[in-house]
Image (spheres, grey):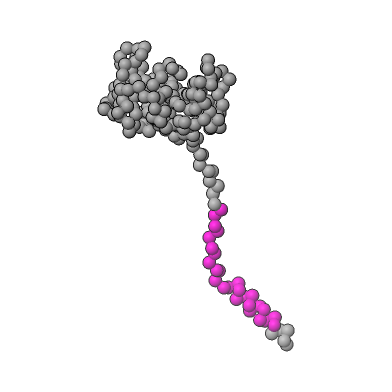
Amino acid sequence: MIRNVVLSSVALLTLAACNAPEAAKTPEEKAPESIAPAARPDAASSAVLTPQGYGPLKIGMTQTEVDAAVGPPPANAAEAEPSECRQYHPPRAPEGLLVMTEKGVLTRLTATKGATIKTADGVGVGDDGEQLKARYGASARFGPHKYEAAPAGYLTLWPGAENLLGTYVSDPAARGLVFEVGGDGKVAFIQAGGPSIQYVEGCS
């Protein structure tokens, strides 16, 4: 008798379970989509050329620091007196960027033909010289080119030290920019750094 009651109870419970309303199902959580990490921009390519430097390169660095930042000078970079001055393209520097070291110290950076880097004002090689003169006005000084006829020339800026315009600057702490405009009226080179931005022939 007891066995029959137990079996009946089990049957009733089973039937109730079958007829019970289905519990609301929790939507399956989607596995988080795999998101590729954003590509980290190259420190140099995301930087701008300023009187103080470019990316990891800072005017005043030692040769050892420059080598650590962008690689050592190539074997053919030696000048007549490499311990005094040399200008070269480091292996890890952006295309068209030259560094100049004097007595083991970084004194100048130069954007040359093919360089895509720009200044903080968005100026790059190939820009129009007349537009630059209009943009900078009295804060810059435009002088004649040493070898080419007008419109070639040099547009010089010493930001924050306009009193230096028109003078030959020798203070190693000075920082400026020189835009060398070619005979076609376009910017051919951009020099950034200390007094060596005034050189017109490499290290002189």
Read off the magenta span: 6-31
Q: Nearer the viewer, residue 39 or 92?
A: 92
* Residue 190 position (above or below residue 8): above
Q: Residue at x 67, y 81 (%)?
A: 8
**Residue 106 appears in the picture as rendered:** yes
The spot of residue 29 in percent (x, y) is: 54, 57
Residue 28 located within the stretch drawn in magenta: yes
Image spot of residue 169 (x, y percent)? 36, 24
- Eyeballing the image, is 52 above or below 17? above
| Residue reaching furthest to the front | 171
Tell me residue 120's x, y (percent).
38, 33
Residue 152 in percent (x, y) is at: 33, 16
Say which of 153 and 204 sits in front: 204
Furthest residue in direction bottom, as rendered: 1
Relative to 81, 49 lies left or right: left
Q: Is residue 88 left or right of residue 193?
A: right
Above/below status of 38 relative to 81 = below
Total count of labels: 0
Residue found 58% across the figure and 73% down from its top: 19
In which quadrant will I find the N terminus?
bottom right
Q: Is residue 166 located in the magenta-colored stretch of the structure?
A: no
The C terminus appears in which quarter of the rendering? top left
Residue in front for this viewpoint, 87 or 152: 87
Q: What's the residue at 31%, 25% (across, down)?
A: 165
Q: Residue at x 61, y 73 (%)?
A: 17
- Residue 187 appears in the figure: no
